[in-house]
Image: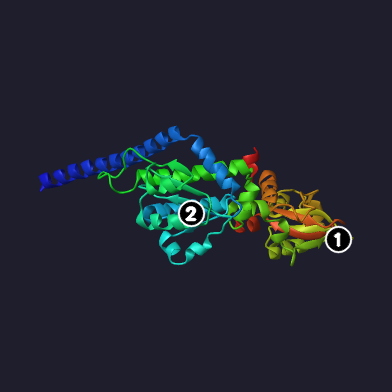
Amino acid sequence: MRKGKRALKETMAKDGSFVIQSAVNTLLTEAEALTQAASRIDVDFERAVDRILSIEGKLIVTGIGKSGLVGAKIAATLASTGTSSFFLHPSEALHGDLGMIDSRDGVLAISYSGESEELSNILPHIRRFDVPLLAMTADPDSTLAGYAEVVLDISVEKEACPLGVAPTSSTTLTMAMGDALAVALMRKRGFKKEDFASFHPGGSLGRRLFVKISDIMRRENLPIVHRDTPLKRAVISLSEGRLGNILIVDDEKRLVAVMSDGDLRRALLKEDFDMERAVMEYATKEPKILEEPSTLASDALALIEEMQIQILPVLNSDGTVEGVVHIHDLVSAGIKSDLKERE
C-alpha cells in the first residue's frame, strides 16, 4: 500500500512538472513566432497602413474557421481604436451579405493557407467592387495573395501544438498582426485617449474623461445648518444627513464652514467642550469646495484623495450651496482618479 502511494506521488510530481514545462514551451514557441514576424516587418506593412487610411468607408475583415474568429477580434479592436470596421463571414457573404460592401470600403481577408474554399469563392466578387483588398496569409503564392494588393506575412516555423496541426502560434501571430495594424493606425491618426473614451463611454476611461460632478452630486435633503445653531442640534443633522458632514451657512445662506464626524470627535477631547455652543466653533473654516459643476468627477476624486476628505461642496456663483459630492458617490459610480498617473 505504501509503495502504491509513493508511486502515485512520484507520478503526480512528474505529471505536474510536465504540465508546467508544456505551458512554458507553448508560450516560448508562440513568443518566438512573434519575434520572427517582427524581424520580417517591412514596407508592405507601411503600405497596408497607408491603404487602410485611404479608405473612406469601412474596413471589412473576413475569414473562416480560426482565422474568422481572430478576424472578428481584429475588427472589434480596429473599430474601438478609430478605424471603422466590421467582420463579414465568407459564407454569409455568398448568400447576400456581399451587399454590405460599398465602393468606399476596403477588405482585409485572413487565411493562413490562402486557399480556404469559402474565402476563395468570394474573392472574385470582391474584385468586382474594385475596393482595396489586403491579405494576411502564410503563402505569398496562394490564391488569396494573388488577389490582394498588399500581403502581410503571418507564417510561423511551427505551431505550439505538439502535433503541429492545431492553429496556435499562427493564430497568436495573426491576432498580434491585427493589433500592430490597429496601433500603427492610431499613431498615424493621432488617436488620443479622449477619442478612445468616446468609443467606450461605459468603461473606466470613459467615466474618467466624461462624467462630471453635475452628473453625480447630491442636490436634495442636504444637512445644512446656520452658523449659530447649537452643536447639540447640529449633531442631529449630522446623523440624519448620512454624509458624515454638515454644511454650515451664514444669514445669506453662503457656505462658511463644514463640520465632519472627525471634527466632532476632536471637539469632544477639548476641556471646554460644550454642546450648547454654536456649531461654528468646532467646524472647519474655509473648507475645500468646487465652484464648477462641470468639473470632471475624476478630478474631484483626485482632490478628495489628495486632501484626505470625504466631501466637496459645490457652490453657486453667489456662494450658496448647489450640491455635494461624496467620495462614496464617486466610487459607486466607478470613477477612478488620475492622481497617481499625474504624480
| Quadrant of the drawing holding the C terminus | top right
User: Neighbour class for label 2 at 10 Å: few (<14), some, many (≥20)?
Assistant: few
Residue 188: x, y in percent? 61, 41
Question: What amino acid is labelled 2 in the image?
Answer: Arg
Q: Is mark 1 on a helix, strand or loop?
A: loop
Residue 193 vs residue 151: left or right?
A: right
The residues tagged by marks 2 and 1 sit, at their Cα atoms, a distance apart of 73 Å
Q: Residue at 80% x, 57% y: name it.
A: 248
Image-quadrant location for residue 119: bottom left
Residue 184: x, y in percent? 55, 41
Q: Residues at badges 2 and 1 in contact (C-beta under 8 Å)?
A: no
Looking at the image, is 43 positioned above or below residue 305? above
Q: Residue at 43% x, 52% y: name it.
A: 70
Residue 208 vs residue 66: left or right?
A: right
Nearer to the camera, 9 or 109:
109
Residue 286 vs residue 183: left or right?
A: right
Q: Which mark is residue 253?
A: 1
Question: What amino acid is labelled 1 in the image?
Answer: Lys
